Image: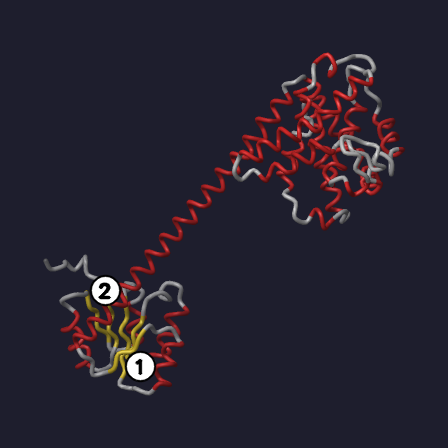
Amino acid sequence: MAKTNEEKQTIILVDDNLTNLIIGENVLSDVYNVITLNSGIRLFVMLTKIIPDLILLDIEMPDIDGYDVIRLLKANPKTADVPVIFLTSLSDEGTEYHGLSLGAIDYIAKPFSPPLLLKRIELHLLLQAQKRELVLINNNLESIVEEKTRTVVDLKNILLSTMAELVEHRDEITGGHIERTRRYIKVLMAGMREHDIYQDEMSAVDEDLVLQSSQLHDLGKISISDSILFKPGKLTTEEFEEIKKHTTFGGKIISRIIEKTPDSDFLQYAKIFAETHHEKWDGSGYPYGLKGEEIPLFGRLMAIADVYDALVTDRPYKAAFPHSKAVQIILEGRGQHFDPILVDLFMKVHQQFERVANEVETGV
C-alpha cells in the first residue's frame, strides 16, 4: 500500500544543475516528499517554512557553496540536527574529510546510482529515527530516575518524621526540646559556615538531612520508664545508670533499621546524634567515654544544644535558668564538657539561641 504525502518523510534536494534536480526528484518521489531547489539561498528561505527530514546538498554552487551552507545549518538550533548528505563530483579524500568534519553524515558521488541513493537515504533516515528514539528513552529514564529519587527522599522524610513523632509524643517537654535543639543546631551550622569552622568536615554534609536527623537524638528515651524519666527529684545512682542507656538504646534502634532497610545510610547522622550527644570533650561523658575529636562533630554540636536547652527550660527536677546563666555555664564547660572551638562559636551566636527558645515557647 502506497504512503500518502502526509506519511512520507520530506527531503530537500539542493543542486544548481537542473538535470540533477529532475533525476533526483524522479528517483525519490515515489518514497519521499521531495522539494527541489537550485541554490543555497533558496534553501534558507524554504527552511523558514518547513524543516525536512534530510537534505541532499551539492557542494559546488555559484551563490553559496555547500560547505558554507552546512556551516549555517549547524549554527542554527532549528536545523542543526537535520542530517545532510553531500552530492558531489569531487572524489578526493580531503574533500570528503572536510565535509564530514563540518557535520555531513555521508557523501554520494555524482552521477549517482538511483538504487544506491535510495538505500543510503533509507539507512540514514533509519539511523536518525533510532537516534530520536534513544533520546526519548533516555529522557524517559531520566524522568523515572528523578521520580524514584523524589520517592526515596519522601520516604526518608516520612521515616525521620515518624520516628521523631514517637519521641515528641513522649511528653510536651520533650516535644519542644526536639524542635528547639534542631533550630540550635541550625544556628551553629550556619555560624560554622560563616566562620569557616571545621570546613573540611562540613563540606560534604547534607544540612537538611542533619537537621532532620537531629530530631532523633533522644529516640532511646522511649525505653526509659516514666518513673525515672519524670522523677521530680535527684536520681539515684542506679536510676542515672538506667537513663544513660537511652544513648545506646537509640543507637541500637537506628542500627536495626539501617541493617534491615535498603538505602538507609542516611540514618548514620541520626545514629551519631543518638549515641554521642552526652560525650564530653575531656572524656568524662557517656556511653563510650570518647575524648576530644574522637567525638563526632554532630555529637559535639548536640552536646551544646542539648545542655543549653536543659538549662533554660523547666524540667521535672529543676526550674528554668535565665539565658545569661545558661551562657555562663556553657562557657565554664569550655574544654571540659564542650569542644572549645564550638563554645567560642556559641558565644558569637548565643543571642540567636535565646531567640529560638522564646519563639518555640510562644509558638512564633
Q: Residues within 10 Å of mark 1 (few under 14, many from 20)?
A: many
- Tell which circle, 2 or 1, labels the residue nearer the N-terminal end: 2
Nearest the camera: 272 or 345? 272
Q: Residue at x 66, y 26 (%)?
A: 219
> In the rendered view, would you say 94 is above or below 253?
below
Kind of element beneath mark 1: loop
**Nearer to me, 50 or 211:** 211
Q: Quadrant of residue 63?
A: bottom left
**Residue located at (50% from left, 38% from top):** 152
Q: Which mark is residue 10?
A: 2
Q: Is residue 257 left or right of residue 108?
A: right
Q: Residue 5, position in %: x, y? A: 16, 60
| Position of residue 311 measured from the top left corner of the image (x, y, whole percent) | 81, 24
- Residue type pointed to by label 2: Thr
Please give left or right for residue 107 compared with residue 264 in the image: left
Can you say which quadrant of the picture contains the C terminus?
A: top right
Q: Residue furthest left?
A: 1
Q: Residue 325 versus residue 65: which sits nearer the camera?
A: 325
